[in-house]
Image (cartoon, coloured by chain):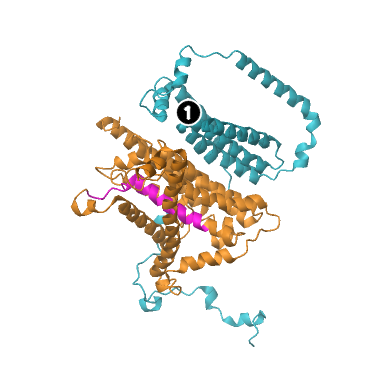
Amino acid sequence: MIAALAFYVFAAILIASAVMVVTARNPVHSVLFLILAFFNAAALFLIAGAEFLAMILIIVYVGAVAVLFLFVVMMLDIDFAQLREGFQRYAPIGAIVGGILFLEIVMVVGAWRFAPDAAALRVNPNPAGVTNSEAIGRILYTDYIFLFQGCGLILLVAMIGAIVLTLRERPGTRRQNIAEQVARTGSVTVRSVPTGAGLKELGILRPPSPEEAKPKEVEHHQGHGGHH
Amino acid sequence: MDALMDFLFNTSLGILILTVVKALALLVPLLIGVAYLTYAERKVMAAMQLRKGPNVVGPLGLFQPFADAIKMLMKETIVPTGANRALFLFAPMLTFMLAMLAWAVIPVNDGWAIADINVGILYLFAISSLGVYGVIIAGWASNSKYAFLGAMRSAAQMVSYEVSMGFVIVTVLLCVGSLNLTEIVRAQQTVWFAIPLFPMFVIFFISTLAETNRAPFDLPEGESELVAGFFVEYSSMSFALFFLGEYANMILMSSLTTILFLGGWLPPFDIAPFNWVPGPIWFVLKICLLLFTFIWVRATFPRYRYDQLMRLGWKVFLPFSLLWLVLTAAVLKLTGWLPA
């Protein structure tokens, strides 16, 4: 009973926050509602007994993806009046795309059928005595290893593509060469000194710089400080 | 007595009451620990810098944390003009809440965790990766440039170091074969993971410094260039919640390091004088050692420059931890030590 009640509470908040993602006027609020939606989806996974998926959902989507979303949305200076300007002009195209997507979903759901052995598995998806993280691992890294690695490769290519697109060699940029800096001696040295002794007692003195060597007369003409 | 036991363990109201009592038994010592961590930090840093530190309120200044807390409570909460009021007040609460929430799965002794869940380590990783939201939301909602710059830095920094932390955790999990925190500690019965995985231990410790925004990675606060960074606009209790959250997170990260690398509640040697000491005391001692190191580092090292911070995270820690992960997996596979 409590599980059913919890399911409906989380599901209701999930749908409500998903609606708010689309309707909120402030994009930062949208992203925050998206995060709330992720959380409630994770809670639904927990109720279904899939705690591994729940935690991964939070780590990957909330902990990493949504942080980057929020980062970008906060950095962008979006003018909303400008965004809404072409609404009527773009509405028909948007409606057509939306309609096609909706039809596709209807077709997919309409042709939905369960695999022959799914009915038996639905009752007890985990083999007895195995935690669900282990159960996922057993399937993912055995039967579906090539598909899994394929997904990884596609993501890698996408990542490299993004880097290649954004990386530009600009002339005149100064780069830090750590090894060169560490190897440099002479101007700056680090030495160990006894605690509590002054620098003068130790005989460590800064060589006088040319500015300091100048007579201090100049300061009198600056006019600040009222001691004269 | 039996009737009471039956009520506590077998009825849902009893279990609820029991859980609340357990949570209080954990959180009250934790908050006192946080209070005295602030005191310890001031005293230790003072000793390292040849000063006295707080010494006026109470004997040796021991009541200083409470004096500070009362001062914070008395002050007015100021919400800046143009700030997003709801989010501005929500951010410190979130930070504090997350710092407390994570403690649900920490096993202080064998079987002493409030919730001994299967995916304990993932839960901790998830909660610690949420910590960045408190900072980002605070920085954005303050509607102040300094706060916003601090929040942006923090977002990039915490996400960067989480990646190498993830690889370190995976390396430990390879040696354990379970995501359960109690199992992770039990797997260190023969040898603490800090010894075979020493480089990972060092990387993890440095990453926890970055993850808790502590010196030398305290760029989100960066007093010298960002005034106080993301919480520059906060005052009174809303500031105190950030402060408490930061210190509670330090204790949390230390306990996570203890569980992953220093054998949790296990004594260093399983022989006579060491195993007389109860497990929770070992656990607390190890946490104290790590916390001392946190303070020691703060008193010793200057702040990193932002590009150096990113370089360390992405170009040093990430490839190294990835390499070590592959190495560990290969060694475990070849020697047949891979846990079933």
Chain letter for the part of the structure drawn in cyan:
A
Tell me the quarter of the image containing the C terminus of chain B.
top left
Instruction: Indicate the position of residue B295 as horizontal and vertical percent values.
Output: 41, 60
Q: Residue furthest left?
A: B272
Between B109 and B307, the one lying in front of the other is B109
Between A228 and B122, the one lying in front of the other is B122
Residue B264 falls within the magenta-colored stretch: yes
Residue B122 falls within the magenta-colored stretch: no
Instruction: Indicate the position of residue A141 as horizontal and vertical percent values.
Output: 40, 24
Helix, strand or loop status at disc 1: helix
Tell me the residue at 55%/67% (across/down).
B71
Work out whether B37 lies above or below A153.
below
Tell me the residue at 62%/53% (across/down).
B89
Residue labelled with disc 1: A152
Magenta stretch in the rendered image: B243-269
Task: Determine crowd level at label 1: few under 14, some 14-19, many 20+ residues with C-alpha closer than 10 A.
Answer: few
Chain letter for the part of the structure drawn in orange:
B
Work out whether B64 lies above or below A64.
below
